[in-house]
Image (cartoon, rainbow, N blue to C red):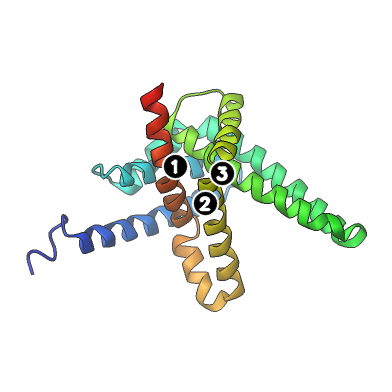
Amino acid sequence: MRWFFDMENPVMRTLSVVADLIVLNLLTIAYCLPVVTIGASLTALNATVMKILRSEETAPAKDFFRAFRENFKKGSAVGLLFLLIFLLLYVDYLAAQTFIPALCPVIAAMALLTLTLGLYAFALLARYENTLRGTLKNALLLAVGYFPKTLGMAVFTVALWLLSVQFLRYGAPILFLFGLSLPCYVAILLMQKVFDNLEKTA
């Protein structure tokens, strides 16, 4: 039994990560509620998930709060920008449904592209010091340059959300506990090697 509770045990490591993701998801949801802090919350989530994936000693709540403070200004600015874009796309989609239904798939594709740019942008904010313009430019370059990984991140995120909403009775707890942290974990898992390779060649 002592072996089972050893943190080097793969089962215990997995359970520890699951517990960390639950804590981070709840914190991210809570800190997104003021709306203006959405970007800072997502940046803090990315920063903490990166530490977990590097197998560093982590205290999820403490690391989240620290990253939230450190990235508050830039993270909030980027978050509000993406929120504005999504709102505009949503209004356009509603209008297209009424007047030009053929445009709906185009707008949905633009929303998916915006989502993938957001996944990269908040990860870049969490990992590197850069201007907002530089962060968004690099997010676009990475999204295009590593398209298979980009597609994987987008498909996983959208599938999780859509399936959870479709089967809301069972999906609501999943969204509440893992709706943000799990897509972030998968995205960082896919991006990690990309970042490591870029840093080696820098």
Please tell me the numbered disc located at residue 191: 1
Q: Residues within 10 Å of mark 3 (few under 14, many from 20)?
A: few
Location of residue 202 by image quarter: top left
* Residue found 32% across the figure and 46% down from its top: 53
Instruction: Give left or right: position of 122 versus 54.
Output: right
* Residue found 82% across the figure and 58% down from its top: 94
Secondary structure beneath label 1: helix
* Residue found 33% across the figure and 48% down from its top: 60
Percent position (x, y) of residue 65?
Answer: 39, 41
* Residue found 27% across the figure and 62% down from its top: 15
Tag 1: amino acid: Met
Q: Residues within 10 Å of mark 1 (few under 14, many from 20)?
A: many
Discs 3/2, front: 3
Q: Is any part of residue 27 visible from this angle?
A: no
Image height of 100 relative to 85, above or below: below
Location of residue 48 by image quarter: top left
Percent position (x, y) of residue 134?
Answer: 57, 24
Please tell me the numbered disc located at residue 153: 2
Percent position (x, y) of residue 154?
Answer: 57, 53
Tag 3: amino acid: Phe
Sequence-wise, the earlier of marks 3 and 2 is 3
Q: What residue is shown with label 3?
A: 147
Q: Determine whether label 2 and label 1 are within 8 Å by CB.
A: yes
Image height of 40 relative to 34, above or below: above
